[in-house]
Image: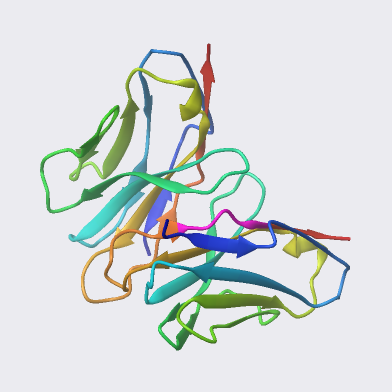
Amino acid sequence: AQTVTQSQPEMSVQEAETVTLSCTYDTSESDYYLFWYKQPPSRQMILVIRQEAYKQQNATENRFSVNFQKAAKSFSLKISDSQLGDAAMYFCAYRTRGTSYGKLTFGQGTILTVHP
Amino acid sequence: DAMVIQNPRYQVTQFGKPVTLSCSQTLNHNVMYWYQQKSSQAPKLLFHYYDKDFNNEADTPDNFQSRRPNTSFCFLDIRSPGLGDAAMYLCATSRDLQGAEQFFGPGTRLTVL
């Protein structure tokens, strides 16, 4: 079974600074997706960024980028120029890719606080 | 805008009193999921529907049931809620089983008195 581990229960950053959230995972599969989801307080979970394991290039979405290290099974999220609206719980998630049903496995989450 | 809608946003029930949570979607996605998320924890998948096919996770208690009368709607029934069932319940959809992205609703927070 796949497992996802986020070792930082809480992180904080100053507005306009950069912060990196860590995620490691364990799997025996070679083809899969990795995601970062953002869950603001009392608001719905939204997808921040997605990475396909077969792609060597790290995914980027505006201020959000990942450092995907497949051999190390590491998938960190970098938020540049942090904004107050980035404050949320961030979940790293794994999903099998391919013909079989791909269940989303979440990490425990990291609460990000952004200080003005 | 296409979206996933959950009603109600907050639900209070009594210990042992059946309760139903509702989810609807305008995305026309084939797959609908129900997750349970307890305070400060990761969401835990309860079950999913692929079209009309129901798939239960092995560790989902029998107390939890689901119905999907049509593509747009899916219901979560808790037959006899216990105090331990107090949680946020998230509905999500995806285009198909291989579709990468799941779209989440805002959740229903269930309180059990």
Query: Residue at the spot x=40%, y=61% of the render?
Result: A104
Q: Does B106 appear in magenta? A: yes
- Asked if residue A111 can be seen in this view, the reply is no
Q: Which residue is most to the front?
A: B1
Quarter of image, res B99: bottom left
Query: Residue at the spot x=89%, y=60% of the render?
Result: B113
Query: Residue at the spot x=43%, y=66% of the render?
Result: B93
Query: Residue at the spot x=27%, y=76% of the render?
Result: A100
- Asked if residue B1 can be seen in this view, the reply is yes
- Judge left or right: residue A85 versus residue A18: right
Front residue (pair A39, B38): A39
- Judge left or right: residue B103 versus residue B59: left
Q: Position of residue B109 (x, y in %)?
A: 70, 55
The kind of secondary structure the magenta stretch mainly shows is loop
Does residue A14 lie above or below A11 as drawn? above
Front residue (pair B90, B24): B24
Residues in magenta? B104-108
- Judge left or right: residue A51 versus residue B43: left
Q: Position of residue A53 (x, y in %)?
A: 18, 52
- Judge left or right: residue A72 versus residue B101: left
Q: Position of residue A2 (x, y in %)?
A: 36, 60
Front residue (pair A107, A86): A86
Quarter of image, res A63: top left
Q: Position of residue A40 (x, y in %)?
A: 54, 38
Does residue A114 lie above or below A97 as drawn? above
Does residue A29 lie above or below B39 as drawn? below
Does residue A89 lie above or below B19 as drawn? above
Quarter of image, res A29: bottom left
- The colour mode here is rainbow
